[in-house]
Amino acid sequence: MTASSGGTAAAARRWWMLMLFSLAIAGNYYAYDSIAPVADLLRRWACWSQDRIGLLNAVVSLPNIVVALAGGLLIDRQGVTRVLLGTAALCFIGGVLTAMGSAYPVMVAGRLFFGLGQETLLIALLGGLARWFPADQMAFAMASFFSLARVGSSLADLSPVWAHGLYAWGWQAPLWLAAALTGVSLLAVCAYAWLDRRAMAVAYPGGNVPHGTVRDAWVGLKEFDLSFWYILALNVLFASAVFPFRSTFAIAYFQDARGLTLADAGRINSLVFLAAIFVTPLCGMVADRFGHRTLLMAFGAGLMPLAFLILGITGWSPWISAVLMGVSFSIVPAVIWPSTVRLVDRRVLGTALGLVNVLQNAGLTLANLLIGRINTAWGAGPDNPSGYDGMLAFLGLVSFLGFLSAALLWQRERGPNGHGLALPGAASHGQE
Ligand SMILES: NCCCC[C@H](N)C(=O)NCC(=O)O
């Protein structure tokens, strides 16, 4: 018997777990994205520079260039549940410190604590889904989970509208809301831990729950298949193009280069996430039902450079590119994570996901820095809209390299070294 098998009661328990995980990630992503909406208040009320505000986000990613791999190893050694409890608690402490901080160092410390937990929490949640969901439901489960993550991000983006009363009090009140949501995330994880304990007692009556060892992780790392490295490259390159554009530079670009108002620039930018809320679970369902995961990833990844190309060389409405990005950002995350799970041994899954996130965070940090440099060097701004061409060329190139990785993965998986990624869920040989 495996943890993901069982009858109706087990199936019901799985959907409860998915609900709790989705709540946990929605609260977490809300807090992750809670700085941008208060940036203006921090600038005007506290007179903080762009650099100071930027550091509040940088300290979340920076530790994960190292910590996510350690977190992944810890998941393989200690199991998902303990790591979930520890990291959700770290995020909660971080959220509270950030909200308490009218003093800058306290806020930075809060964001640092939050960052220490954030990526490992995501990895552990994905590991938990992989543990409980069978192959033919995993893409839908992970896609629904990411759909709720986007709800968290979108609610944070739009909080100045729906929670405008809080913003009238200054920047701390909205950050207390974010802290409260990290508390909800911690409660959801505690409820999961309770469910998990009962379920494990049934799956492993002797209490001998198998965990990987450091040696397993080392051997596993050396034995990762070429397909894993392709999917890792896709993940890093795709994230390095999407997140810096969407979260850092898009609003200024749409205002300066496309002449949109701040409100319209915000609207077009949030379309990418709003579309993903609805389309991502559909993509997961398609992957479970029909397979063709590598083709889906190549198609989704191919839409991203196309979107940047259209922005860069045509005068077409930016909404066209936003729609292409929204579709791409729905397909790739829905398929890439469940596919990664199929490519590695379960005993080293945490380590594998940790490695992906370490390189992804390095890519995100580097891309943010490089794009900033490029925009400065090209003199991008309202007086020089074509100064953004360098940024678009860079993003187009990075996302095209992501597409190439997806195409290579597609080609490899069609041959004798494939892992059944093209097959429907039940027919493929995911390691249950
Ligand atoms: N919130 C922006 C960065 C998220 C990075 C994270 N490691 C990740 O891969 N998330 C997956 C996703 O699609 O949100």
Image: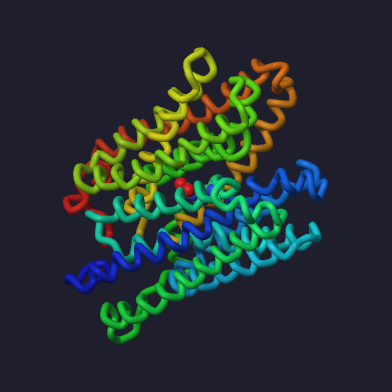
Q: Which image quadrant: the C terminus?
A: bottom left
Left-right relation of 107 to 338: right
Q: Position of residue 384 (x, y in %)?
A: 70, 16
Residue 369 seen anywhere in this rendered image of the structure: yes
- Name the residue rendered at 32%, 68% in the picture: 16
- Name the residue rendered at 79%, 49% in the picture: 45
Left-right relation of 385 to 231: right
Left-right relation of 174 to 77: right
Is residue 367 placed above or below 52 in the rendered structure? above
- Front residue (pair 180, 213): 180
- Front residue (pair 372, 35): 35
Q: Position of residue 300 (x, y in %)?
A: 37, 33
Q: Position of residue 207 (x, y in %)?
A: 34, 84
- Name the residue rendered at 37%, 80% in the picture: 197
Residue 347 seen anywhere in this rendered image of the structure: no
Tell how many labels.
0
- The picture quadrant where one finds residue 166 is bottom right
Q: Name the image colouring.
A: rainbow
Left-right relation of 233 to 6: right
Q: Which image quadrant: the N terminus?
A: bottom left
- The picture quadrant where one finds residue 330 is top left
